Image: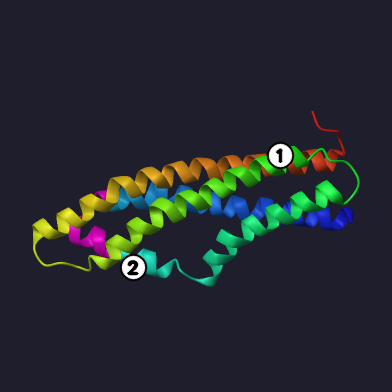
Amino acid sequence: MRALQGVSLLGAVLLTGLSAGLYYGFAVAVSPGLRRAGDRTFVEGMQRINTAILNGWFLLLFAGSLLLIAAAGALHLWGGGSRAAVPWIAAAGVLYVAVLVITMAFNVPLNDALDAGGLPDGAERLAALRERFEDGWHRWNVVRTVCNTAAFGCLAWALVRYGSGASPK
């Protein structure tokens, strides 16, 4: 059982860290880079990114993180041994659920609206489409990046607590 506890927790750390890194990359490189682009380039670039990211690797991060956090939590809570990691896994679970809620409630609807707008003719229509999308999407991406990074930190600390066999403090 101890091996399953360790493997599930390590997997949760890795996938959650990769997910946090993906969102961080958007926050510090993709969004600022596209911010400097013209309206047509911005809209077309984000539409292409939104299409490209819908793949199995992203699904592995997006859903796999939650599944491994849940598995690690259950195995540490009911699998015997020290429960030192449980509070940290639980905190990570809450934070990661916040990431999913933010994504589904804010980022995905903005992505869908941008996609539905197509690539309109005319500078004013392109600028309006961009304006409805850009600031809100970036703001919510930063919020989910912070939540995801905090979840990663909680899981990393849970792994330390698990490795030390310490009791919860």
Q: Which quadrant holds the C terminus?
A: top right
Left of 81 or right of it: where is 57?
left
Q: Around disc 1, counting alpha carbons within 10 Å, would you say few (fewer than 14), some (14 to 19), or many (20 or more)? A: many
- Identify residue for label 1: 88
Residue 166 visible to the viewer: yes
Give the extent of the magenta segment: 35-45
Q: Residue at x 31, y 65 (%)?
A: 47
Q: Secondary structure at mark 1?
A: helix
Q: Residue at x 44, y 66 (%)?
A: 53
Left of 120 or right of it: where is 3?
right
Q: Is residue 143 above or below residue 71?
A: above
Q: Is residue 120 above or below residue 74?
A: below
Mark 1 is on which residue type?
Trp
Q: Which quadrant holds the N terminus?
A: bottom right
Q: Around disc 2, counting alpha carbons within 10 Å, would you say few (fewer than 14), some (14 to 19), or many (20 or more)? A: few
Type of colouring: rainbow
Q: Secondary structure at mark 2?
A: helix
Q: Position of residue 107 (x, y in %)?
A: 39, 54
- Identify residue for label 2: 48
Mark 2 is on which residue type?
Arg
Q: Main secondary structure of the magenta part?
A: helix
Q: Are marks 2 and 1 in contact (CB under 8 Å)?
A: no
Q: Residue at x 33, y 68 (%)?
A: 48
Of the pair 94 and 56, the residue shown nearer to us: 94
Is 42 a magenta residue?
yes
Q: Position of residue 118 (x, y in %)?
A: 22, 68
Counting labels gives 2
Q: Residue at x 69, y 43 (%)?
A: 90
Of the pair 11 and 143, the residue shown nearer to us: 143
From the image, state whether disc 2 or disc 1 is nearer to you: 1
Quadrant position of residue 116: bottom left
